[in-house]
Image: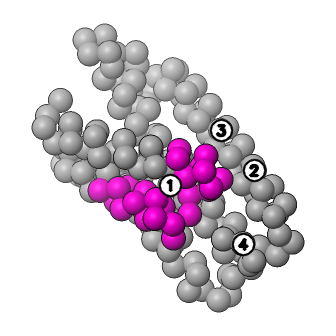
Amino acid sequence: MSALGIIHTLVSLIPILLAVILLLQQGHINPRSKLGFWYSLSTVAAVTTAFTIMKTGKLSEGHFLGILILLLIGAAYLLPKLSALQNLAPLLERVLMSTSFFLMFIPTTVESLSRLPVGAPLAPEGPESPLVKQILGVIFLLYLAGLFWQYKRLKGTTTKFSQSA
């Protein structure tokens, strides 16, 4: 792995760790909390460093995924400014931030399984590997369950979404 690849890998572990802490502590990734801010900033750093190591010579699925992650986080920060969405803002924020977290696992899973263990990767065929597809399927189900749990938790804390954030 190149030096940039190692830096990217280390930087990319930070938002994953922060998201897990936030989900366990707060039940969601709140971009306006201190850890939520650091989650967002480290995610931007992870996406930016990913762009430096993608060497296809053209835009790839990874580039579009990175751009989508950045757009989701940006949209979560803009929600409080959109008065038309105030009643739905807490729910939409949870969906946007959770989706950014979920999407990070797509390249993480593909790259990890197609490279590790070194010399005999578990899924050398990359995204087409049945193992990769199965693991991403499980991660997707966990994402959906997490969204449902956050919705139920939010709905249970208040009758109006606008009162919680």
- For the C terminus, which image quadrant? bottom right
Of badges 4 and 3, the one in the foreground is: 4
Residue visible at 21% across and 42% down in the picture: 7
Horizontally, residue 138 falls left or right of residue 65, namely right
Disc 2 to disc 3, how far (Cα)? 10 Å
Mark drawn on residue 100? 1
Of the image marks 3 and 1, the number of the one nearer the N terminus = 1
Of badges 4 and 1, the one in the foreground is: 4
Boundaries of the magenta span: 20-45
**Residue 66 percent coordinates (x, y):** 38, 55
Disc 4 to disc 3, how far (Cα)? 24 Å
Q: Hey, which residue is sitting farthest top in the picture?
A: 120
Q: What residue does disc 3 label?
A: 142
Q: What residue type is labelled 3?
A: Leu
Horizontally, residue 26 falls left or right of residue 109, namely right
Residue visible at 45% across and 27% down in the picture: 128
Of the image marks 4 and 3, the number of the one nearer the N terminus = 3
Disc 3 to disc 1, how far (Cα)? 14 Å
Q: What residue does disc 2 label?
A: 148
Q: Which amino acid does label 1 sit on?
A: Ser
Residue 123 or 18: which is nearer the viewer? 18
Q: How crowded is mark 1: few (under 14 residues within 10 Å), some or many (20 or more)?
A: many
User: Is the residue under label 1 in contact with that under label 3 (CB below 8 Å)?
Assistant: no
Residue visible at 55% across and 27% down in the picture: 135
Residue 129 or 103: which is nearer the viewer? 103
Mark drawn on residue 164? 4
Of the image marks 2 and 3, the number of the one nearer the N terminus = 3
Q: In this view of the protein, can residue 64 be seen by the observer? A: no
